[in-house]
Amino acid sequence: MRTLLMTAAVLVSTAASAQVQVSLTFANATDTLSVGKGDCNSRRVVSWTSTGTACQELTLWLTEGTECKETADQQTTRSVLTSIPQTTLNQTRQGTFEIDLSLLPFSNPTDSGTRSCGVGGLEQAFRVCGATKAIDSNVFGGTTCANSVTKATPAKILYDANPPGAPSIEAVDGLDKALRVSVSEPAGTTTLKVYVKLADGTVVTSADQGVGQGDFEVEDLENGVTYQLTATALDAAGNESSESEAVEGTPTKTNGFLEEYVNAGGKEMGGCGAAGGGVAGGAVLAVLGFWLFSRRNRSWLEQ
């Protein structure tokens, strides 16, 4: 009985160790990567991890669509990638390889249209697939491969060459050597960009930020100069929309309290008691109230 139990335990242990699992991911352990037509001459790194005992190398390929079959030959469209040796799978258990995005295997329609990486107006999903085999735990010696194929957990590539819709500039406020700009956020947008131009179309500066971060504040501008502002929207694949309609904005010098007081007819007397009382003191308070709540200086309070 003891021998039988020991034999059963060995068989269970062998079966458990013979299992193999492989996962494929991109940077930061994400399983999905968005790319656009501007990425087609670049490469992306894929990470792999394995557990258990593989009986053969891990074959890798790209395919169009949503399903990884057991071999690359079973896919209608595919690009074969490098393979990971069996010893590397079983000993190192993790590593990376690169994908040339120009190899994304687009299928072309029958109407003589062209579908390839770099063509605009397309949206297509691809899978990074992998397959190996585990050791057959039912065969003594542990060198025979199982009949069934073990497919890796695939990574997904989304090719998106459709930019989001153009945003609109909803408000522009003049600040001291700066402009505050409110921009709408079209669906699918991940980043907004504002261009600041002179009247002749020369771009002076630009600023970008993620959605949900509130208004832009574009600084280092000249007071009294009227600028033309436009905005664009970018998606996760880097596609940039067309520009919004132009809106004008003019930075405005912000006076300090003393300047506002003098401009309002007060006198720069100096000293702690210069304001005095009565009419003079009331004038100071009136100017102070005007200065604090003027539109031009409200931005100072909000900072």
Image (cartoon, rainbow, N blue to C red):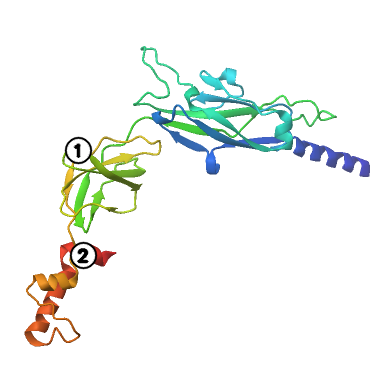
Q: Could you say which is closer to the camera, residue 155 or residue 269?
A: 269
Q: Decide: is 111 above or below 4.
A: above
User: Based on the displayed image, in which of its 4 quarters is residue 6 positioned?
Assistant: top right
Q: Secondary structure at mark 2?
A: helix
Q: Between disc 1 and disc 2, whose residue precedes?
A: 1
Q: Position of residue 196 (x, y in %)?
A: 24, 44
In the displayed structure image, the side of residue 91 where residue 7 appears, left or right? right
In the displayed structure image, the side of residue 117 where residue 217 appears, left or right? left
Quadrant housing the N terminus: top right
Say which mark, if any, is on residue 40: none
Q: Could you say which is closer to the camera, residue 206 or residue 55?
A: 206
Of tags 1 and 2, which is closer to the observer? 1
In the displayed structure image, the side of residue 122 where residue 41 appears, left or right? right
In the displayed structure image, the side of residue 209 where residue 223 appears, left or right? left
Say which amino acid is labelled 2.
Arg
Q: Position of residue 287 (x, y in %)?
A: 12, 74
Pointer 2: what residue?
A: 298
Say which mark, if any, is on residue 201: 1
